Image (cartoon, coloured by chain):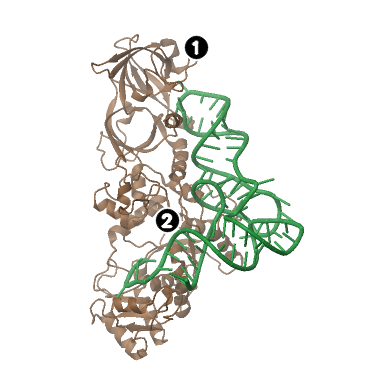
RNA sequence: UGGGGUGUAGCCAAGUGGCAAGGCAGCGGGUUUUGGUCCCGCCAUUCGCAGGUUCGAAUCCUGCCACCCCAGCCA
């Protein structure tokens, strides 16, 4: 099944980490089930997002831990909204996340014949009937949350008539909406989903899998439990909003001659601060051009996170850390970013890049001299080795790393102050060159040749180490900086007359067209990830990059104590 | 106002009658050629509220309050 490195697989399997694992452990221990089978059942009507990742990690994870298996099953019972474009993206995303369903790829549509047979079975048992009321009339008969519903006048049709009508529905004799097959349960049931729910509707539309074979399609409430039963799913894990449907789920399983009895267990779906998870709303962002597409790096879709530079390991780690419970909750985005940085810190190579360049001339460095300095690739991983970085008389430093009148807690470069250039030399600022508007255009500094490599033989200290790039050797590239797509931690928190679009962050994308990168970055391939020292983790964008002309996305910033100090000062 | 759920720190989350795990965030300190990482320390006398049972209650009982879900021929 999963072939990724199992960082957490050493966790004591005998101590369940959540209520679902506790239930499963009991069922396995009691012998109720000999083998665990779970399933991930997406409807192919959109792209997968980080919320789906929680479900995927849970379903595949719990099976793996217990020597069980997981099916990937497309819940494709509504051809009006589904397509193969979505099934393909879903398979790609599940694979990317690191999970393998093997030969267990299924579709609810694979079971249409069996489902139809069981619908006929229910009719024969007097437990289903064809209703010919209009959709609106059915709604009127349903009652309300506090009042019972009323029986449809068609509820007492004979079994023979129901059989005939249902067969003709299937044969295409009726237009959409003319009839519907309903389970005969109890129109006065306090649980509205038990008030004779529809189980088949007429839809003259071809299906992405079954083509034009059918013009009637089963409803979720009917198809899902029975598909689970057909596949002998032992534990059917879904989100809280289906809790109301569980009695119905069980009713179908109990009233059809199924080969196994699955158990539905509900858990809270993932909510993330500064993020929306609704497929409908994400689609709106795409359709209205607020983002670049489903895989825009600011989107919470798996394809968006992937393009942004997130790793599957980090997403899995996040899903494992947040746990599984029944209480509605909103996880802070910082939690996701922690898992990301945790991995990238260990694995990403370091590089130097200057986003907002300020020219610096080392006045006592020989005009035509150049040298190659050794730079460690990853201080967290000696195996990553080192590289050479060119140094010369003219350099670029980050503008924010110099202040003419530094406040007390600023310990980077300032007039007369000495700092270290990473892997290079100590330099001291001697002059500040300004243009006619008083803007700083250049700095003059001197270097101490004895500090080559960054160590001072006399043991003197500097309070800051800055990243830099040799001007002559710098490689120009576009760098895209991302911020929260929404300004409010709760995007839905808006004034009376507004919707979530009101909270869109106008500064969620900041494009730097000419960042100065160290030359080793010029040949970076799409998807390449590294840390730009002191700035954050970046990756080569898969959409805008061209051979020899990489465009970088900022995946996430580094934690920044100085930024925190500045923020507090305000 | 019917039914189904859920309330433990700023955010997640264990805990199931024996004296409030862990993570994130935050704060303080140490190390550091990234103001990163790492390390150390602090961060709930109290578990939605009020009663009750008990030697002992976040855990059991009663009542109340708050929030979420359900009236698709969506899933």
* Chain drawn brown in the picture: A
Q: Choose between A71 and A224: the one closer to the eye.
A: A224
**Sequence-earlier tag: 2 or 1:** 2
Q: Choose between A340 and A378: the one closer to the eye.
A: A340
Quadrant for residue A155, please give it.
Answer: bottom left
Q: Chain of mark 1?
A: A
Quadrant for residue A359, please give it.
Answer: top left
Q: Choose between A487 and A12: the one closer to the eye.
A: A487
**Horizontally, is A205 left or right of A87 in the view?**
left
Query: Residue A482's x, y, as percent?
Result: 33, 39
Answer yes or no: do the residues labelled 2 and 1 have beta carbons within 8 Å?
Answer: no
* Chain drawn green in the picture: B
Please tell me whether residue A358 is drawn above or below residue A170 in the rendered image: above
Query: Residue A239's x, y, as percent?
Result: 45, 61
SS type, badge 2: loop
Q: Is residue A239 visible?
A: no
What is the distance, in whole Å, between disc 2 and disc 1 at their CAs? 56 Å
Q: Which residue is mark 2?
A: A100
- Give the label, 2 or 1, closer to the camera: 1
């Amino acid at each position: 099944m999963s072939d990724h490195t199992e960082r957490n697989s050493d966790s004591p399997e005998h101590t369940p980490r959540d209520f679902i694992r506790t239930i499963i452990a009991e069922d396995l221990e009691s012998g109720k089930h000999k083998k665990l089978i779970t399933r991930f059942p997406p409807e192919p009507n959109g792209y997968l997002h980080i919320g789906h990742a929680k479900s995927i990690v849970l379903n595949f994870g719990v099976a793996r831990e217990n020597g069980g298996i997981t099916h990937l099953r497309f819940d494709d019972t509504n051809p009006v909204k589904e397509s193969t474009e979505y099934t393909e993206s879903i398979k790609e995303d599940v694979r990317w996340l690191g999970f393998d369903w093997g030969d267990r790829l299924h579709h609810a549509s694979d079971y249409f014949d069996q489902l139809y047979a069981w619908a006929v079975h229910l009719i024969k048992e007097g437990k289903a009937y064809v209703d010919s009321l209009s959709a609106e009339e059915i709604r009127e008969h349903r009652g309300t949350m506090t009042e019972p519903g009323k029986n449809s006048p068609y509820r007492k049709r004979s079994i023979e008539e129901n059989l005939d009508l249902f067969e003709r529905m299937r044969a295409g004799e009726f237009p959409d909406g003319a009839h519907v097959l309903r389970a005969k349960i109890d129109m006065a049931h306090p649980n509205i989903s038990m008030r004779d729910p529809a189980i088949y509707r007429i839809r003259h539309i071809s299906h992405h899998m079954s083509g034009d074979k059918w013009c009637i399609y089963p409803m979720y409430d009917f198809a899902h439990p029975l598909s689970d039963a057909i596949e002998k799913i032992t534990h059917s894990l879904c989100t809280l909003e289906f809790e109301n449907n569980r009695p119905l789920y069980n009713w179908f399983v109990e009233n059809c001659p199924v080969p196994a009895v699955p158990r539905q267990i509900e858990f809270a779906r993932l909510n993330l601060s500064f993020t929306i998870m609704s497929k409908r709303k994400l689609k709106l962002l795409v359709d209205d051009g607020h983002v670049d597409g489903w895989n825009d790096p600011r989107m919470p879709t798996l394809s968006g996170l992937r393009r942004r530079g997130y790793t599957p390991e980090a997403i899995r780690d996040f899903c494992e850390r947040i746990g599984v419970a029944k209480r509605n909750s909103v996880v802070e985005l910082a939690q996701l970013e922690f898992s990301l940085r945790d991995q990238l810190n260990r694995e990403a190579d370091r590089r130097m890049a200057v986003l907002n360049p300020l020219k610096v001339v080392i006045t006592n460095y020989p005009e035509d001299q150049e040298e190659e300095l050794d730079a460690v690739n990853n201080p967290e991983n000696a195996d990553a080795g080192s590289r050479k970085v060119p140094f010369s008389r003219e350099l670029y430093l980050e503008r924010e790393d110099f202040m003419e009148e530094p406040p007390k807690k600023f310990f980077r470069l300032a007039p007369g102050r000495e700092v270290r250039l990473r892997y290079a030399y100590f330099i001291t600022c001697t002059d500040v060159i300004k243009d006619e508007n008083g803007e700083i255009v250049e700095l003059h500094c001197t270097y101490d040749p004895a500090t080559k490599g960054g160590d001072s033989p006399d043991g003197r200290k500097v309070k800051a180490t800055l990243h830099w790039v040799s001007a002559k050797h710098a490689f120009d590239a576009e760098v895209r900086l991302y911020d929260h797509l929404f300004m409010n931690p709760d995007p839905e928190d808006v004034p009376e007359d507004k919707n979530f679009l009101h909270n869109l962050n106008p500064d969620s994308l900041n494009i730097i067209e000419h960042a100065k990168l160290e030359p080793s970055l010029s040949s970076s391939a799409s998807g390449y990830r590294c840390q730009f020292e002191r700035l954050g983790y970046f990756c080569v964008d898969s959409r805008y990059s061209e051979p020899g002309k990489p465009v970088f996305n900022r995946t996430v910033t580094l934690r920044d104590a100085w930024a925190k100090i500045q923020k507090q000062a305000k």
